[in-house]
Image: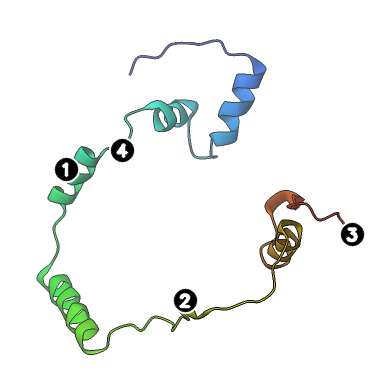
Amino acid sequence: MAVTTITIDLEAYDLLSRHKRDEQSFSQVIKKHFGPQPTAGRFLEHVRSLRVSESALDALEQQVRARHTEPARAAKRTPRSRIRSDRVISGAELARKADDVWPSPRGHTTGRPSP
């Protein structure tokens, strides 16, 4: 295999080395990130090349049949038309409640001061 030498600055080297695993060469990292990208056509080629055994097909068929006899049940939800509230909530109060339920990543909040 032919090789060539390239020159990159330290910032580019640091970026490249962050993606490199112990068992990989820099060439492999570059090919993985900048080589051919996945497409629907490549996926279809891959799927067409797969071979599935008869026993695997039988197991899949059995699972599908079992779903017809015992369907998964979704949680019961109250329709929006039946939810009533006499209280109006301000945007700031709603943001505080949202922070209590879903804390934002990296410590960002939706307006609530930090404790």
Secondary structure state at the residue bearing disc 2: helix
Give the image location of residue 45, x and y in percent: 16, 43
Q: Nearer the viewer, mark 2 or mark 4?
A: 2
- Where does label 2 land, which residue? 81
How many numbered tags mark residues here?
4
Q: Residues within 10 Å of mark 1 (few under 14, many from 20)?
A: few
Going 65% across and 20% down the picture, which residue do you hit?
11
- Where does label 1 land, which residue? 45
Give how far apart the Cα atoms at labels 2 and 3 are: 38 Å
Q: Residues within 10 Å of mark 3 (few under 14, many from 20)?
A: few
Question: Amino acid under label 4?
Answer: Pro
- Where does label 3 land, which residue? 115
Question: Amino acid under label 1?
Answer: Glu
Secondary structure state at the residue bearing disc 1: helix
Question: Amino acid under label 3?
Answer: Pro
Mark 4 or mark 3: whose residue is earlier in sequence: 4
Q: Nearer the viewer, mark 3 or mark 1?
A: 3
**Considering only vertical position in the picture, is 48 above or below 88?**
above
Q: Residues within 10 Å of mark 4 (few under 14, many from 20)?
A: few
The answer to whether marks 3 and 1 mark residues whose Cβ atoms lie closer than 8 Å is no
- Where does label 4 land, which residue? 38
